[in-house]
Amino acid sequence: MKLLVLSHACVVPINQQFFAEIENQTGWEVTIIVPTKWKNDYDKVIKSERWDKFKGKIINIPVLFSGSIPLHMYWAWFIPLLKQLNPDAIYVQHEPYALATMQIYIANALSVRKPITFLSWQNIFKSYPFLFRQIEKFVYQQSFIAFPGSSSVENVLRQKGFRGDCQFLPYAADPSIYFSRADAIDLRVQWQIRECEVVIGYLGRIIQEKGFKTLLHALALIVDLPWRFVLVGTGDYESQVDQLASQLGVKDRILKLGFVPHNEAPRYLSAFDMLVLPSETQANWKEQFGRVIIEAMACGTPVIGSDSGEIPYLIKETGGGVIFPEKNYEELADHLRQLIVNKALRQELAEQGQKSVSTNYTNASITKRFIDVFSRFVT
């Protein structure tokens, strides 16, 4: 089978490993169209690169409005390209309302007319402007199936009128990359962590939605315990975090490390004694999945997460952590205290989470779902 993929995410090499796994399991011929450059969540412009295990063709095309999921468009007229490639099926790794999605769906309808499908992570019902509603409607009508990232995403698709089949397609953690790293001890030495101290970690964007105000107030309630908070990432909420940490008297217990490359994340996750993800639902946002949760669990690190979006369902399903009501800093402090003083509980949660992720959230298991769908529907 010849599979054509449209994906801005695959500018980042590690996101191509899903398709490398498809090649490995099936021998399919996979071609990925990606932007030549893309502005990521940290406002850095990154160039397209290849994941070394992906053997298929990568087609780089410049885009307008780089960094915008709904608005980016490719500087290309896809009809000649589709006729040249003549794929057996097309997978659009974009939201159904996006302009880039519209581009390739229209080109497919006007030329090769191959089975086509999309991925969605939109877990809040939103009413878009007229043009984007029409794009959504057209994409729904043309798609032979949809790949929602979670059950709440499927609920939104149904509310918006999608009547086709759905296949849950969450994120995965590659066990050859995300595993407990023995050299994580070197990081703890570098951070000057004392043997008695427990490392509470966060890895991701530093933005208001991630619940730092709640976290800092919780940390202020447990200053009597031996802990350090290691903050990995950058974002527009950093100055507010610094200011509040100073006001609450916990700034000297926080180690800020800034941005680290994606391929370094497993070492940092392994160096944490626990990961905290205190996300807080906003009017136009709630946690869509919490990819760092399964990545941390794969590295043998238990998770404390809020009940925003998919976080509680993921933690309950894996058994690799504990949940607190979002914005409730007192209950978060109780969970932190419990895990700090109870090493055996941390170990129990870590083992359960690692076991569950290795069974249900590997590239191999998630990719198999994808392959089974195309094997059934595409002839």
Image (tube, grey):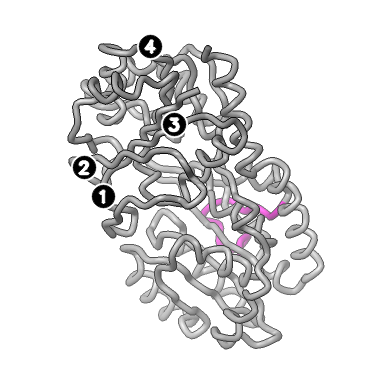
First of labels 2, 1 by sequence position = 1
Kindly indicate whether the residue at mark 1 contacts the one at mark 2 (C-beta within 8 angstroms): yes
* Crowd band around label 3 with a 10 angstrom C-alpha radius: few (<14), some (14–19), many (20+): many
Residue matched to label 2:
62
Label 4, residues with CA under 10 Å away: few <14, some 14-19, many ≥20: some
229 or 14: nearer the viewer:
14
Asked if marks 4 and 3 touch (Cβ < 8 Å), the reply is: no
Residue 321 position, x and y percent, is: 69, 55
The mark that comes first in sequence, 3 or 2, is 2
To which residue does mark 1 refer?
Answer: 37
The amino acid type, in three-letter code, at marker 2 is Pro
- The answer to which of marks 1 and 4 sits earlier in the sequence is 1
Q: Which mark is residue 141?
A: 4
Residues at marks 2 and 1, CA–CA distance in whole angstroms: 7 Å
Q: In this figure, which residue is indicated by the disc labeled 3?
A: 120
Instruction: Say which amino acid is labelled 4.
Output: Gln
Q: CA distance from mark 1 to mark 3?
A: 22 Å
Task: Give the spatial CA distance, label 4 vs label 3.
Answer: 15 Å
Compared across the picture, whether 275 is left or right of 119 comes to right
Of badges 2 and 4, the one in the foreground is 2
Instruction: Specify start and end residues of the magenta stretch as a single range.
Output: 320-334
Q: Position of residue 360 (x, y in %)?
A: 69, 40
Q: Is residue 327 magenta?
A: yes
Q: In this orientation, which residue lies closer to the viewer: 7 or 151?
A: 7
